[in-house]
Amino acid sequence: MKIYQIFYNQETKVMLDPKFTPFDNSSPTYRSWHEFEVIKKIIETNIFDDNEYIGIFSPRFFEKTGLTGSDVIEIVGKSKSEIINFSPDLEASISYLNCFIQAESKHPGFISVAQKAYKIIGLDLDLSELISNHSRTIFSNYFVAKYSFWKVWFKYALKLYFLSANQSNIICNKLNALTRHRGVESYPMKVFIMERLINVVLENEKIDSEIGVNYEKYYSLKEYSGEKVKEMFIIDELKSLMKKNSGKALLSLYFEKIAVYRYL
């Protein structure tokens, strides 16, 4: 098991968990790629066993999840799954049919660019129609996976990486166009398309991730009511049912449940 945690400066260095392996990204080669540059360096410069678990987290991991390095090591150590999902935001997952529609709400034009880019690299899924429960919804690269899975993911990631640099392809400019994030328009669209690549790969490979977060504990610390947490689980289960049984009745029920949830 090898769990890395990235830092960019002294401020983020002090946020690191001592149980994780620190990775210094204070002098990135390509600033526009943010975390992906680190992931690329780690995969290309290390030798891992196919069954070895690898994770690469941001410095805000504890702030976002409430999980320590010891917690992660214990959870992964007990797992036999290919992928363990440590993405904490169940609410963001259930609030949209999939994380691509969620991205469209934050970054207008996302689905159009992502749909074309994923198709070019060999992942031809209809992002606007996809229904993903939380076992196939991961944000912020917050997952740990066996190296055998990372290799599958990295094959597509490299294609997307080179596509964004191919100025002869019309999609290149759209991938590098800036979009707003945290109130600043300084992040290229490709960063968010790369971040959500894991979700397309999970759908394409028909693999579910194991959930590594205790959501009842996580949301109780955020002072969510028990009723609200219960509704999140119900809506996520409804999305699972919708994947198996297509039909307007379940879809209508989903939107009704979401409308009610927002007033809880």
Image (cartoon, rainbow, N blue to C red):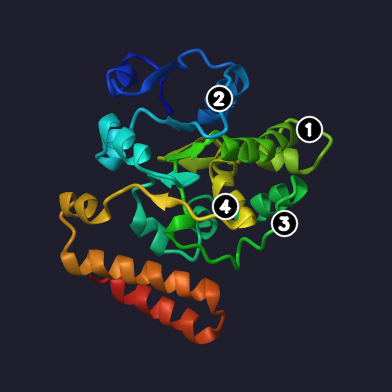
| SS for dot 4 | helix
| SS for dot 3 | loop
Three-letter amino acid code at the position of disc 3:
Asp
Q: Residue sitting at 54 percent across and 17 percent down?
A: 28
Neighbor class of circle 4 (other Cα within 10 Å; few <14, some 14-19, many 20+) is many
Neighbor class of circle 3 (other Cα within 10 Å; few <14, some 14-19, many 20+) is some
Residue 141 in percent (x, y) is at 47, 39
Residue 252 in percent (x, y) is at 46, 82
Say whether disc 3 or disc 2 marks the residue closer to the N-terminus.
Answer: 2
- Picture quarter containing residue 245? bottom right
Residue 75 horizontal side relative to residue 150, left or right: left
Residue 262 in percent (x, y) is at 30, 69
Q: Nearer the viewer, residue 92 or 83?
A: 83
Residue 202's mark?
A: 4
From the image, state whether disc 3 or disc 2 is nearer to you: 2
Residue 39 horizontal side relative to residue 114, left or right: left
Mark 1 = which residue?
A: 166
Mark 3 = which residue?
A: 124
Alpha carbon of mark 4 to alpha carbon of mark 3: how far?
13 Å
